[in-house]
Amino acid sequence: MPTKTLENPNQSNTDEKDKVVVTLIEGDGIGPEIIGQTIRILDYAKSGIQFEKIEAGSSVYLSGILSGIGENAWDTIRQYPTILKGPITTPRGKGYKSLNVTIRKTLGLYANVRPAKTYDPFIKTNHYGTDIVIIRENEEDTYAGIEHRQTREVTQCLKLITVPGTEKIVRYAFEFARSNGRKKITCMVKDNIMKITDGMFANIFLTIAKEYPEIEAESMIIDIGAALLANRPQKFDVILAPNLYGDILSDIAAEVTGSVGMCGSANIGDMVSMFEAVHGSAPDIAGKNIANPTAVIKATVMMLTHLGKPGKAKLIRNAVLKTLEDGYRTADIYQNEKNTILVGTKEYADAIIDRLGKDPNVLTASELVKPKSFQLSLSNQKEKKELVGVDVFLDIPNNRNPDVLGKNIESIAEQFLHLKMITNRGVKVYPKGQKETFLTDHFRCRFVSPTGGKIQHKDITAVLTILEAKGYDFIKTENLYEFDGVPGYSLGQGE
């Protein structure tokens, strides 16, 4: 898509050396409105920010590009690697990909930083004194988007957690906390169930925590953690989480501190960074001059700090706080209380512009200093890796008797590998399964060496060849490895 430069009429008083060009994605729905008002504020603040607009979102989707972004746009981003982005609408179905996920993963935006703070006593909340930052891993987990329909009844989504990806986000979280004077990091995972994936995330967190003795580190199960965040958010300082949990937690944090319309977001990478609102495109209120631009304004404040313009960041941040103190409210945060004024999107921005250069009397906000760079050091390359088995997944649409299936497979495969067990939806059904277990058409058969120890790939292919010859539909295999003698796979009952 061709690019278009947006002129900022009030930049004439800004020195040429202070000007920075930022890639702009206006977005869909309310995106152009809130982005437009944010640019007005930047202009009046003489921020030195100029924009190079690229086309992305609904117009690009409708042109037939399923990713929502054209090839030429990537060149603009490489030239101007800081992005200010409005919310995007991803069409449902028909193979359309989330533009947010595409940009984050393609450009390596591994850290999603989402501050959430109450504005008491000016914005009504049940949780006064809350000031937390959600740091969310941004590239891995189930957001890798690798899904399959394997049988008529069963689908799967792969959850990918890597050592370098986890180390990078954990180190970022600790450097962020250290740089910003934060005292505690809570890592939220579900490692009591997902012992390998979430377990590795938690273990790396606790390992790296030893390098930051001045910062309190705790690991917490996600379900109780989310409940505590919703009920006692003041308990937390910085929360670190894998991708999916982090997405959910950040919306909870936004709601308990006031509104998703008040929370900005930074997506940080080694070469490119993107700043956006936490909320979506809200097409139902687009064009009605009622949207709250605060989230994207706050994201812009984070962007200014990132670009080395803390003075301009503080100027705009203080004007926002002063506007809230003076009672100006968009519809989402208006409570019809004394000394408050219901205003539209433009009028709210006007109020902020009028208060540029003024300081709030009560409200404060942190600078959110950019963390120092760091080097990755963890490596598992020296571990001894041995192939000790294979899980073969079968589609069994009819005659789902585990005992019959198990005896049949044992009789045809035993000359190569031993059938250790069969599971259905993770529950062992052979040998010695329970008759009450509900069965689908998706069976996992675990094969190991008949004598114990290592196996070879040719053993696996031999078993698969026999299964195919006997009419079994194997839909997937997962090799089982040990690393320095430790199983790198989930164990079944009795193992």
Image: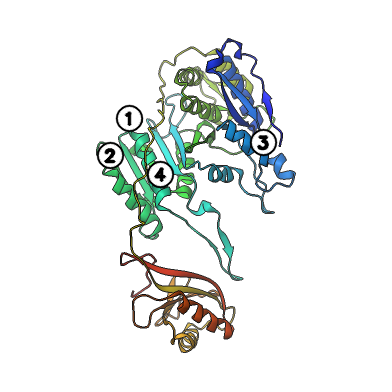
Residue reaching furthest right? Answer: 63
Amino acid type, mark 1:
Gly
Query: Quick one: quadrant of the N terminus?
Result: top right
| Label 3 close to label 2 by CB (< 8 Å) | no
Comparing marks 4 and 2, which lies closer to the viewer?
4
Cα distance, mark 3 to mark 2?
43 Å
Which of pointers 4 and 1 lies earlier in the amino acid sequence? 4
Residue named by callout 4: 168
Name the image quarter holding residue 447. bottom left
x and y, in percent, of residue 386 in the image: 37, 69
Cα distance, mark 3 to mark 4?
34 Å
Cα distance, mark 4 to mark 1?
20 Å
Query: Quick one: quadrant of the C terminus?
Result: bottom left
The secondary structure type at the circle numbered 2 is loop
Q: Look at the image and tell me whether residue 46 can be seen.
A: no
Residue named by callout 2: 212
Which of pointers 4 and 2 lies earlier in the amino acid sequence? 4
Q: Nearer the viewer, residue 333 or 281?
A: 281
Point 62% across, 30% down: residue: 24
| Label 3 close to label 4 by CB (< 8 Å) | no
x and y, in percent, of residue 186 in the image: 34, 43
Left/right placement of residue 245 relative to residue 452 reads right
Left/right placement of residue 216 relative to residue 3 reads left
Residue named by callout 3: 29
Which of pointers 3 and 2 lies earlier in the amino acid sequence? 3
Cα distance, mark 4 to mark 2?
15 Å
Left/right placement of residue 66 relative to residue 429 reads right
Q: Nearer the viewer, residue 447 or 247?
A: 447
